[in-house]
Amino acid sequence: MNSDTSQWLEINRDSWDQRSKIHLNSDFYDTEGFKKGKNTLNDLEIGLLGNIENKKILHLQCHFGLDTLSLEQLGAQVTGVDFSPVSISYAEDIKKEMGFNAEFICSNIYDLDLVDSHDFDLVFCSYGICGWLPDLNKWAQVISKHLKSGDTFTIVDFHPSVWMFDDDFKEISYSYFNEKPYVEVENGSYASPNSKEEISSIWWNHSLSEIITSLMNNEMDLLSFKEYDYSPYDCFRHTVKISKGKYRIKHLESNIPMVYSLVLKKK
């Protein structure tokens, strides 16, 4: 991996260490609600995953593990992976406090290799995934090598069209296509927008064709592709709640896709 990529990783790892410290006790993540029995997965991804009882799941880019542990609540045996040491430390703390069995691993996703030590049935990741990765082919290679023939990969993520807009969703500020990395500094986080902490990060926009092609080029067949005209999270500006767990940008209504999902099967 070249020096530029190492710089991207260092900057983004630091940014997610910062975000985790803000997110842990935020209303958005509602960690206390989880500790009282709330499952943090949305109906959308639960429906896509189906019955996961006794399934061995590799959960990539797991943040501080609430969704990982929610997968365990549904009966799965789960390994959660994230590149942020702070996130993994929090995940371990919550796991021990609540008596869960999930395994947490701190690793840059490109370096992950659990093939000899684990036998997974499916790989899963959700929300805020591809935009932090410079090379989707390497990402897809990691996913593919952790699946056996017939196993599945499921992703639910924010639609790349969302990331074309400025923060107020009034202008097109970024390309839909992966033309270059974007270097940005923001105050606060989507989970705590009033925070004064300054966070630097580097991100990329990847088109759906790039995402799907990267996966299919790595020995996976597409089983399902869907787009959704809402976000299950109130994490953008100017949102309006249309029903329980569904939000849209008020002035855009249902005119843009906000989330997509993919299910692929290893050949």
Image (cartoon, rainbow, N blue to C red):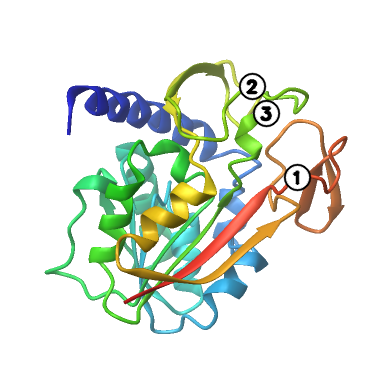
Disc with the residue nearer the chain's start (1 vs 3): 3
Residue 103's x, y, as percent?
29, 62
Residue 11's x, y, as percent?
34, 23
State the SS at label 1.
loop
Residue 28's x, y, as percent?
64, 43
- The one nearer the camera, 159 or 195, is 159
Q: Is residue 115 above or below residue 131?
A: below
Residue 36 as seen in the image, left or right of residue 62:
right
The residue that mark 1 highlights is: 256
Residue at x 59%, y 25% (from the top left corner) = 174
Give the CA distance from mark 1 to mark 2: 16 Å
Q: Is there any visible trace of residue 187 in the rendered image?
A: yes
Mark 3 in CB contact with mark 2 (< 8 angstroms): yes
Residue 195 as seen in the image, left or right of residue 78:
right
Q: Residues within 10 Å of mark 3 (few under 14, many from 20)?
A: some
Mark 1 in CB contact with mark 2 (< 8 angstroms): no
Question: Residue 122's mark?
Answer: none
The kind of residue on which mark 2 rests is: Ser
Residue at x 58%, y 42% (from the top left corner) = 160
The residue that mark 2 highlights is: 173
State the SS at label 2.
loop
Give the CA distance from mark 1 to mark 3: 11 Å
